[in-house]
Amino acid sequence: MIELKHGRRQWALLSPAVGLITFAAAGPLIIVLIYSVLQKGDYAGVIWNFSADAWFNVFLERDIFDDTVSIADAHLSIFMRSLKLAITATVMAFLVGFPTAYFIATRPARSRNIWLFLITIPFWTNLLIRTFAIMEIIRNEGVINTLLMASGIIEQPIQMLYTDFAITLGLLYVYLPLMVLPLYASIEKIDFRLVEAAYDLYGTRWKVLRRIVLPLVKPGIIAGSILVFIPALGAYVTPRVLGGGKNLMLGNLIEFQFGQGRNWPLGSALSITLLVLVMFALLFYVRNTTRSHAHG
Amino acid sequence: MFRKTLVSLAASLAFGYTATAQAAGELNIYNWGNYTNPALIEKFEKAHDVTVTLSDYDSNDTMLAKIKAGGHGYDIVVPSDYMVSIMIGEGLLMETKPNEMDNFSNMLPNFVDVYFDEGRNYSVPWQWGTTGVTVNTKTYSGDVDTWSVIFDPPEELKGKINVVPEMNDVINAALHYKGFPHCNSDKAQLKEINDMLLSAKEHWLSMEYGNVERFSNEDIHAGVNWNGASMRSRLQNDAIRYGYPKEGISTWADNVVVLADAKNTDNAKLFQNFIMDPENAAMISEFAKYANGISGSLAFLDPEFANAPEVVPPAHYETVFVPPCPQEVNELYTRIWTNLLK
Amino acid sequence: MAELSRAKSFDVRRQPGFTAVAILCFFMLYAPMVALVLYSFNAGQSIGTWEGFSWRWYESAINNREIQQATIRSLQVAGVATLVSTIAATMAALATTRTRPYRGMTFAFALINQPLMVPEIVTAVALLIFFAIIKGATGYTGMGYLLAAHAAFCIPFAYLPIRARLEDMDLTLEQAAADLYATPWQAFRRVTLPRLLPGILAGAMLAFVISLDDVVITLFVAGPGQETLPLYVIGQLRRIVTPEMNAVSTLFLLVSAILVTVFFLLSRRK
């Protein structure tokens, strides 16, 4: 009886969040699932007949020129590129974000807020604008190339813009605060008496970092990585602006199918595929967190 | 203290919504970004006591997706020629009969019987132009009137080319270059197009829409481009030239149409009539640097515009519209395009 | 505070090289912003070449009606979305941490985090179709859809820091409050909330930023007259980009900075 009442109160607390997300985020996804097994309409839209064409086309393709069936090479390379860039950006964000979050968390309480404040400020500018800002820095006539050329280090500008490097840098720049904030929240909670105890037991700095600090901030690492990886994997604006639109990422491919490609079922099927990819990543994370909880 | 702030913040925001009172008449226009002269809208609002709301899109297909889904709330959109015929076919447009409107007599005769709206029962011309090549002549002094600067670029231009990411524009240009027919479903020919595009892409720097600044800054030195955009670049950098490829070029024309489920039909029709007035049509062109289809509008424009090489093609140069291709062809194009961008 | 006094001889918190990386990180975050602000004062037409100091782009941005309206709308949408999502997220965080497992808790947790798992473009398309159906059925085409969509995808961003904070808070103080016959509400109001506030603020900040940033979902959900600043900017992408955009973003940055500062100062007040 008490159990039931308890559950009811929790659900009352949950209802605004759950209701809103069901209505305006999760629920409508069912439509995407349905659309992925419908026949595509002429000039966009769908025809309400069952069809597996879209799913066939995600993974396989009938060669336009000789009708043989093979693995969808174009889609596969776009999937691989998206994964590669998103993982690189996440790892880089961690490598830069962890020391930064640690640095902030170990400041005196008073200045800590100011540092946090400084981390969020660039993040308060619109994403498109920040992407343009990065563009200004790395373009051929941009700040970096101008400085390098003025100091005589290089003679020709280095082509950085419109490369995979530019996309990775853009993703890193744009999503870095999403890594730092949860990391900070975790590091701030560390009981440094544990660290002290480790030093008393003659741990080296590296060992203490690896064996004590990192396991303690694992929830923060996971939260931060999820927050960076997922938007990076489905990124649309950054690859379009900094990648020069020459090489698609998954987000662009999906948008293309709903736009110029006029193939909504294929777009839906690609979206579901992307979703499944993300779920696998999450499952991996969840399994790791539960294991660490069991130890703790 | 903190809670009070939140409450007052919420109150002021809620007030912000109710305070946006509307005038008697309304009109919701959905047009390409940075394509509409604000002065034109103001003039229309004053003349007819209407509050105009302007929203932006970045491609015909973004617009089509939104309109097809329904419940969009727009009255007027500005699709390109082939998109007008698709939208008519899909029953998305209202037959507003511009040909019976007061200012219809101002429409240039060759704009009346267009393939996408014979006799103008739905649409009114907004602006029109061509998709050709833009080249920086300081970088490359050779012949610019050819698609080869894009598809088989000279050494000077390699790695300095931007191609607008419009599937139809690019594939049509490639078909022109190879001398193949439009709306092509010949697999052998498409294979050639596919291979040519793939090897040409090696030499392209980017595939972007916004390129006016990038040409004048010499960030890019050649590209598939629209004439008005090219003219805007030239006005900032003398070295920029717009080339009319001898292999052929496509024309496009954007048109003002009223949606079948528009709520403010009367105001929408007023707007269609309004922009067929030469002075108003001139305001459109003055802003975006593309020609319109209204006779007498040049009288209100800078003479430099009327004679600009981007606006006036060389004598005897023929440009063609490419009508919408059958669905199977579009599918083949899409495959080539996805393959190009992989 | 014991460890602080010991720190003189051997700082257990120090990790070599971390400060350098942190400084580099701040530099990397700020260099593009500085360039952005600098070029907003460029007298020339183009973003690339410096042609002297001028206020002209500010004048043109401030007088641009589309920019005015889009900016106000962006702030309104972000404000409402932040308020709604932060409240919902705080409630949800209280219901999913430090509690006995109950039926459906895991499900609720997964659902709340759902917007993080789904790429924006997918949600955007789903919402386009779904809202169109509702619009057709109810005839309502107002701002509600955009606000609902924004509030929904902001919830997990507000939820994560709040939950992280809650999880790490120990229960003793609340138990003490309960022992002293405080009602659950009093215990929450007097004990939990003050200590949770940094988490809530971090959550609200994230939510605001995420709403302000959104391009893709807004692009598909926004109806006529609901254009936010990002939509205005992406519309510009196609045609021409002038330092006016830099001016707009500098102003936007200024407004945001003032907002954060206000929150920052408020959160330090007792």
Image (cartoon, coloured by chain):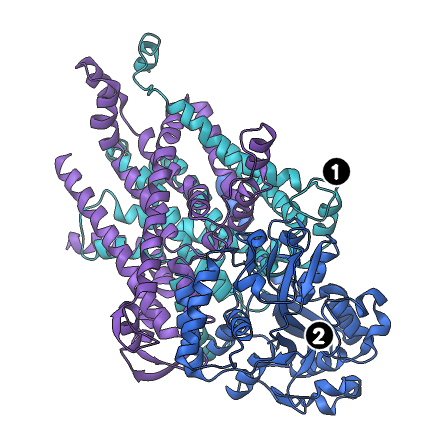
Chain colours: A purple, B blue, C cyan
- Disc 2 versus disc 1: nearer the observer: 1
Query: Is residue B77 shown left or right of residue A168?
Result: right
- Which disc number belongs to residue C52? 1
Residue at image position (17%, 38%) is A292
Query: Residue A15, can we see it?
Result: no
Mark 1 closeness class: few <14, some 14–19, many ≥20 residues within 10 Å = few
Identify which amino acid the numbered label 1 is placed on. Answer: Gly
Query: Residue A114, can we see it?
Result: yes
Can you give x and y, in whole percent of width and height, for residue C27 in the image?
A: 50, 30
Furthest-left residue in this view: A294
Name the foreground residue: B169 vs B28: B169
Name the foreground residue: A204 vs B96: A204
Residue C157, compared with residue C179, is above or below; it is below
Furthest-top residue in this view: C9
Mark 2 closeness class: few <14, some 14–19, many ≥20 residues within 10 Å = few
| Chain identity of mark 1 | C
Residue B177, compared with residue C91, is above or below; it is below
Can you give x and y, in whole percent of width and height, for residue A105 in the image?
A: 37, 27
Name the foreground residue: B60 vs B239: B239
Which element carries disc 1, helix, strand or loop?
Answer: loop
Identify which amino acid the numbered label 2 is placed on. Answer: Ala
**Alpha carbon of mark 2 to alpha carbon of mark 1: how far?**
46 Å
Can you give x and y, in whole percent of width and height, for residue C66 in the image?
A: 66, 59
What residue does disc 2 label? B24
Can you give x and y, in whole percent of width and height, for residue B168 in the image?
A: 52, 73
Residue C93, compared with residue B104, is above or below; it is above
Residue at image position (51%, 70%) is B62
| Chain identity of mark 2 | B
Which element carries disc 2, helix, strand or loop?
Answer: loop
